[in-house]
Image: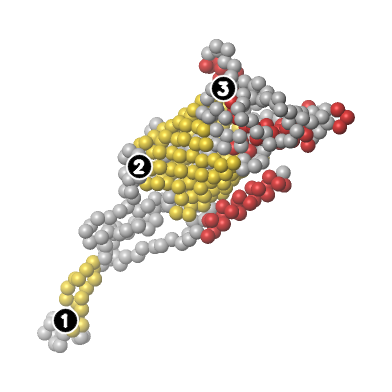
Amino acid sequence: MVRDFSQITSVAVALFGIVLAANTARAESWQLVDRESGVAAPSVAWQEVENPAAAGVAQPGTWHAVEKINSWPQVGSIQAASEDAVAPDKVESPSNKSLPARQWLSGNGRVPYWNADWKPQISNIVPQAYGPRGVMFSVGVRAIDCTTGANCRDRKGMSYSRYFNEKGDAYIATTLGFGDSSKWLGIEINNMSQGVAFSGKRAGDPFLGGNMTGFSISRNISPDTAIKIGVENMIRWDPKQADLGKNAYGVVSQRFRLNGNNDPEQSLFSNLFITLGLGNGEFRPVDKVIGAQIQAQRDAHCWTWGYIPPGGIDCSAKAKSNALLKGTEYGQFYPIGSVALMLYDSVSLIGEFTGRNLYAGASVQPIRGFGWTITAMAENLLPNSDYGRNIQLGVRNIPSNFVYPPNVIIDTPKFSIQTNLNIKF
């Protein structure tokens, strides 16, 4: 465990080194305006006069204003800037052409937020880096038609509803975000509840049981660039039911404005988001997770592949269960990433690599201006170690005839759907 957290600390230090090195100072633009009208005051020219009385000057003096020679850009009435806007990249030029202020992206969970509106998700399993500004809250349900260990190969001609009921699973995810990732730090506290009444093999578990809680810290280093580190499922509140892997990760997200700085709300292909990073735990390939479980059983003196405990006496069932659970936690880091194209303001296409496999799908916002998103994904698209191929456990003294337990292997993609309600206070 110490080694696992030292790896997490190393990643955290490296990522925040980038943040601390970035120039986070904000430039403010100031303009001279009339106190009552809010209109920019003009510049004037001054001319020397020899006879002030003849020139009509009310007060004796040597200089007086004779004409306007230029004016500051008009800014309209004095109003507070939008909370998502910073000083404009350019103010109005003499040709009266201007560009809008760049919007600082924020977000909560996997859902981004800008222009005072929630948008479709830009990732599914891989975390995105944009953090909260103010208080944000998200709650959602994610369902998958088959889980690892449920024998996803064997449909036996059953209907899809029965297949999901027997092999599928569902989770309730909540995320509370607060702080300001554009000025200092955004903080998110996330929780997974595995006890969902209709969730397949968990249908008999206590409702809203199996809770696991994690957190993340994020920082924007530009309007379109953010960095985040976090741990998912760090605290198990009820170990008997909570059995998801513990994941540590660090990611960087970048937005590319395909329509320049204008970014109209209802344009096709307006934005491209790319997220890259590292993750462990559930972000590892399946064969590496199984290898870690084998090693954890050996460490607990449990009978397992390539290992016989001292005296040939197996460990207790509880010790073996704890060892299998420990094998899902943290471990080596692997590359993760996602790409999301905003097909339309309310539709995004998503592709991501979770460190384990390739996923692809889409996210939609059914009602524009309302923070409700629906995301559907096809998962496990690559026939890699999930399919029992090219297995490399990374554990010594494993017999050459090692094969996965039959219930672990899959031979078809999985499908998931999730829906989220997002609120900004």
SS at badge 3: loop
Q: In the displayed structure, would residue 345 be above or below residue 60?
A: above
The disc placed on residue 411 is 3
Q: CA distance from mark 2 to mark 1?
A: 59 Å
Residue placed furthest toward the right? 311
Residue placed furthest toward the bottom? 50
The kind of residue on which mark 3 rests is Asp
* Label 2 sits on residue: 270
SS at badge 1: loop
* Label 1 sits on residue: 57
Q: CA distance from mark 2 to mark 3?
A: 37 Å
Q: Quadrant of the N terminus?
A: top right
SS at badge 2: loop
Q: Are marks 2 and 1 in contact (CB under 8 Å)?
A: no
The spot of residue 377 in percent (x, y) is 48, 29
At x 27%, y 59%, the residue is 92
Is residue 230 rendered to the left or right of residue 24? right
The kind of residue on which mark 1 rests is Val
The spot of residue 308 in percent (x, y) is 82, 29
At x 63%, y 38%, the residue is 281
Judging depth in this view, the residue of 44 and 329 nearest the camera is 329
